[in-house]
Image: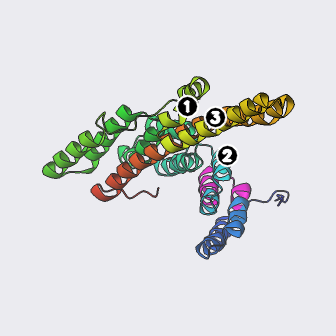
């Protein structure tokens, strides 16, 4: 743990702040993110100016983003006080907060940050610059109607050529057709199917052969139990045979849930990549994602 103590009555002067930022920026440029983060934190701690403090915290959060420590980045950005900040700094802080949450898999939190940005930032150009990330967040939350509307609003705002705009809007309509958005399966249904009809949960998830194998192994367990009982090895049959059956029966239910969740993830990510590629190649999207 690194502790920073303020000396009595000391605060960073303008010259000190500039020099400290230069040092931190140099460390950042040389990929020394941990050292740079310490200096940025030092600036934030010493400065009595909320604008300077906020800029330093944003840069410290960038250090964590570069290190892929997304939750740490979110924690740093939560220390920012938005009162008195201009739209430019506020939008950067809220965007980075949403990005860190998105990359950390906390999509509801990311949506919250983006909605706050839309509410409190008056400069529409800054809020529309966040729309690609907003669209990706909505897709992750399976809010496809809202995502399609946001995508259309973004294209309408950012594309000025009427023919290009019309073409892109048609592409969005096609991309978000009901038949093309992910049709997610229910993990609970997969579990119940495997409970009453072993192997059906895997089949429902789209893994036929794995379901067949699971059924086969359960039948082996029951068959072994039957043979042992027929040969009057009751204890062996009950202990080994039924144990095999029970293991693959309960394991089959758990596996079916996993496979459905895996399938849902794969089809969602495939759709999201399609939307992301569209935003990157067909629009003027310049924000870092």
> Quadrant where the N terminus lies?
bottom right
> Mark 2 and 1 residues: CB-CB less than 8 Å, in contact?
no
Within 10 Å of disc 3 (Cα), the crowding (few <14, some 14-19, many 20+) is some
Residue 258 sits above or below residue 197 on the image: below
Which residue is label 2 attached to?
A: 79
The image shows residue 66 at horizontal and vertical percentages of: 60, 63
* Residue pictured at 73% horizontal, 33% vertical: 227
Within 10 Å of disc 2 (Cα), the crowding (few <14, some 14-19, many 20+) is few
- The image quadrant of residue 228 is top right
The image shows residue 253 at horizontal and vertical percentages of: 63, 32
Residue 226 sits above or below residue 208 on the image: above
The part of the chain drawn in magenta is: 43-60
Give the distance between the C-alpha atoms of the residues marked 2 and 1, in whole angstroms. Answer: 38 Å
> Mark 1 and 3 residues: CB-CB less than 8 Å, in contact?
no
The image shows residue 192 at horizontal and vertical percentages of: 58, 24
Which residue is label 3 attached to?
A: 219
């Amino acid at each position: 743990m690194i502790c920073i103590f303020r000396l009595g009555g000391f605060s960073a002067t303008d010259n000190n702040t500039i020099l400290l930022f230069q040092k931190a920026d140099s460390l950042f440029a040389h990929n020394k993110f941990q050292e740079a983060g310490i200096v940025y934190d030092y600036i934030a701690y010493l400065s009595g100016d909320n604008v300077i403090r906020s800029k330093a915290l944003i840069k410290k959060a960038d250090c964590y983003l570069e290190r892929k420590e997304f939750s740490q980045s979110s924690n740093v950005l939560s220390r920012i006080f938005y009162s008195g900040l201009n739209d430019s700094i506020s939008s950067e802080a809220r965007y980075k907060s949403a990005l860190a949450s998105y990359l950390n898999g906390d999509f509801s939190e990311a949506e919250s940050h983006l909605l706050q940005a839309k509410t409190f930032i008056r400069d529409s150009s800054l809020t529309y610059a966040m729309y690609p990330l907003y669209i990706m967040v909505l897709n992750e939350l399976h809010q496809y109607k809202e995502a399609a509307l946001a995508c259309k609003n973004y294209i309408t705002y950012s594309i000025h050529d009427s023919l290009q705009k019309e073409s892109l809007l048609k592409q969005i309509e096609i991309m978000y057709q009901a038949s093309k958005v992910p049709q997610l399966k229910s993990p609970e249904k997969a579990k119940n199917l495997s409970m009453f009809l072993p192997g059906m949960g895997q089949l429902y998830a789209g893994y036929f052969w794995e379901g067949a194998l699971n059924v086969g192994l359960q039948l082996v367990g029951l068959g072994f139990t039957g043979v042992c009982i027929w040969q009057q090895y009751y204890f062996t049959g009950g202990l080994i045979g039924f144990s095999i059956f029970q293991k693959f029966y309960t394991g089959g239910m758990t596996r079916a849930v996993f496979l459905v969740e895996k399938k849902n993830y794969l089809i969602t990510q495939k759709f999201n990549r399609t939307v992301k590629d569209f935003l990157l190649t067909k629009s003027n999207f310049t924000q870092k994602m």
